[in-house]
């Protein structure tokens, strides 16, 4: 059952932070935790799950840390959330082809569509919003 928890939100923040520093090499958990105000121990668990799923790689040593295993264009928000939260199943336990089930299935499909945005797209949207000029008269 899909449930967007703090774990999913933190996971997305961490992936976006990893992309931000992708050109600089591995980033340490401590740096991500401080930058995004995520408890370090909790972030370790999140990154371990993402590593097991093949979305991030880790490197040991003084210059070690985490990097994305794929480009931001190859990772979707849905990828991250499925790993951390599980699949979206809003009509679970009911017939998805009847009455209310059809409604929940349509919501599930809409969510799946919206969450299929890539991390690269999310970053571009964030930059666009930050660059919008504000005018005051």
Image (spheres, rainbow, N blue to C red):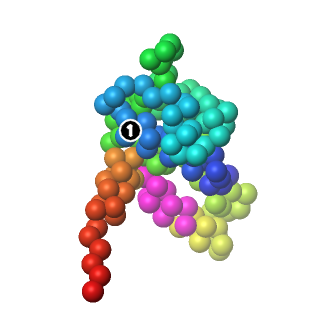
Say if the magenta span includes residue 15: no
Mark 1 — residue?
A: 19
Give whichever of 124, 88 is nearer the camera: 124
Q: Residue furthest front?
A: 137
Q: Is residue 35 left or right of residue 21?
A: right
Q: Which residue sits at x=51%, y=34%?
A: 31
**Residue pictured at 55% horizontal, 67% vertical:** 107
Q: Is residue 33 visible?
A: yes
Residue at the bottom extreme of this rendering: 137
Q: Image quadrant of residue 125? A: bottom left
| Residue 118 position within the rendered picture, expressed as x and y whole percent measured from the top left | 38, 48
Question: Considering depth in this image, is 37 or 77 the residue closer to the camera?
Answer: 37
* Residue situated in front as seen by the camera: 22 or 79: 22
Query: Which residue appears at 34% of the width and 64% of the height?
Result: 129
Which stretch appears magenta? Answer: 107-116
Q: Is residue 76 left or right of residue 44?
A: left
Q: What kind of element bears circle 1?
A: helix
How many numbered callouts? Answer: 1
Q: Position of residue 120 (x, y in %)?
A: 34, 47
Depth order, front residue of 93/83: 83
Q: Main secondary structure of the magenta part?
A: helix
Residue 47 found in image quarter: top right
Q: Residue at x 44, y 41 (%)?
A: 17
Q: Quadrant of the C terminus?
A: bottom left
């Amino acid at each position: 059952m899909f449930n967007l928890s703090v774990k999913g939100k933190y996971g997305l923040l961490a992936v976006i932070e990893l992309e931000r520093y992708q050109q600089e090499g591995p980033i340490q958990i401590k740096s991500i935790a401080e930058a995004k105000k995520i408890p370090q121990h909790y972030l370790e668990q999140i990154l371990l799950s993402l590593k097991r799923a093949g979305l991030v790689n880790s490197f040991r040593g003084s210059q070690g840390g985490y990097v994305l295993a794929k480009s931001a264009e190859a990772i979707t928000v849905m990828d991250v959330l499925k790993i951390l939260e599980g699949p979206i199943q809003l009509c679970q336990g009911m017939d998805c082809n009847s009455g209310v089930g059809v409604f929940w299935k349509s919501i599930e499909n809409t969510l799946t569509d919206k969450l299929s945005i890539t991390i690269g797209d999310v970053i571009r949207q964030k930059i666009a919003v930050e660059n919008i000029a504000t005018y005051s008269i």
